[in-house]
Image (cartoon, rainbow, N blue to C red):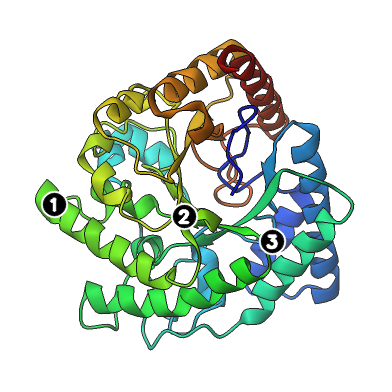
Amino acid sequence: MKRSTERILTTHTGSLPRPDDLVTMLYAQEQGETQDPAAFAVRVREATAEVVQKQLAAGVDVINDGEVGKIGYATYVKDRLTGFDGEAGPLRSADVLAFPNFARRVYRLTGVKRPACTGPITYKNTAALQTDLANFATALDGVAPEEAFLSAASPGVISLFLKNDYYPNHDAYLEALANAMKVEYDAIHRAGFLLQVDCPDLAMGRHIQFTDASLADFRKNAELHVEALNHALADIPPERIRLHLCWGNYEGPHHLDVPLHDIIDIVLRARPAALSFEAANPRHAHEWKVFREVALPPGKILIPGVLDSTTNYIEHPELVAERLCRFAEVVGRENVIAGTDCGFATFAGLAEVDPQITWAKFRAMAEGARIASQQLW
């Protein structure tokens, strides 16, 4: 994994706006509607190439496939793993429910399926995974980003979105998920890409999955999630892995978010060398100060969000530079890569930020990274 040794590098969290026609295809597939598989495959391949070019044009250094072929960053696994035939029911966050009028506006039908686990979990469908790998490799042919990554759901975030109705307890469910998802993690690594594991469960899980637990009990569960993740990542060098931490990619109260200070020690025990996390939005922008108190372990890299992924405000490049310099002054410039709070299309077609504005935000990030580099070097 490259570091910011000569300038501040730029990257993002993962999901990017999909073309409208592809969104239609993804939801048709989600609902089991008949469509031309060949036409769908071609459109995903084309969209992957398009999103690679858009990232490079916007000044992003460490790029990905935009997750264009997935309907959602966590629920996609239901089509790749055995055991998911039940019904998970609604997923609600305590901070939103605290404001009933707002909750009625937020919770709308999305068309994204969230089945429950009702049987033994194994990795059954490597075809979709191999297609992702091949499409991205083809899209990278002839271009030269600083690095390339692919995202995958963590065992913990899968357990958050897809509830367990089969395994005797949460520990056993996590173990089964970790053993199955290891197939995907290892394949991404063998293909030569950086692996990003998405772990909102380590933060967002507090006000969704463990709302009624004490902080101490939530921390114990977070430790279990990290242990399961580390088991699944055991055969991949830490410097080839990024971890994304977030409190939920939605514009909402977030007043019940667990503070970064209360979980950072557990998060830093995870195997990945790089930590991507929210650092731009109004609830977490102040938490750069945590790293004044908590030393960054040797070999670790921070990818703080310098763009808010839930607002159509385009951050000023000077603000981006200011945010980057704060982190660089605390942990060292070589240990900071500019990132985004979360994805800009966590679920296909449900982005809160207009696609054209998304790319304008990326250009602002690139310019802010250039300003910060001039100041830091």
Identify which amino acid the numbered label 2 is placed on.
Asp
Which residue sits at x=45%, y=66%?
A: 114
Residue 215 or 326: which is nearer the viewer?
A: 326
Residue 88 or 267: which is nearer the viewer?
A: 267
Task: Tell me the tag on residue 212.
Answer: 1
In this picture, is 286 found above or below 252?
A: above
Task: Tell me the tag on residue 69.
Answer: 3
Identify which amino acid the numbered label 3 is placed on.
Gly
In this picture, is 103 found above or below 363?
A: below
Choose the circle earlier in sequence order: 2 or 3: 3
Q: Secondary structure at mark 1?
A: loop
Which residue sits at x=68%, y=64%?
A: 192
Residue 171 or 302: which is nearer the viewer?
A: 302
Which of the 4 image quadrants contains residue 272?
bottom left
Q: Nearer the viewer, mark 2 or mark 3?
A: 2
Choose the circle earlier in sequence order: 1 or 2: 2
Residue 50 visible, this angle: yes
Residue 31 visible, this angle: no
Which of the 4 image quadrants contains residue 356?
top right
Q: Secondary structure at mark 2?
A: strand
Q: Secondary structure at mark 3?
A: loop
Q: At which x and y percent is residue 191?
A: 68, 68
Q: CA distance from mark 1 to mark 2?
A: 24 Å
Which residue sits at x=39%, y=75%?
A: 177
Identify which amino acid the numbered label 1 is placed on.
Asp
Task: Tell me the tag on residue 198.
Answer: 2
Which of the 4 image quadrants contains residue 270?
bottom left
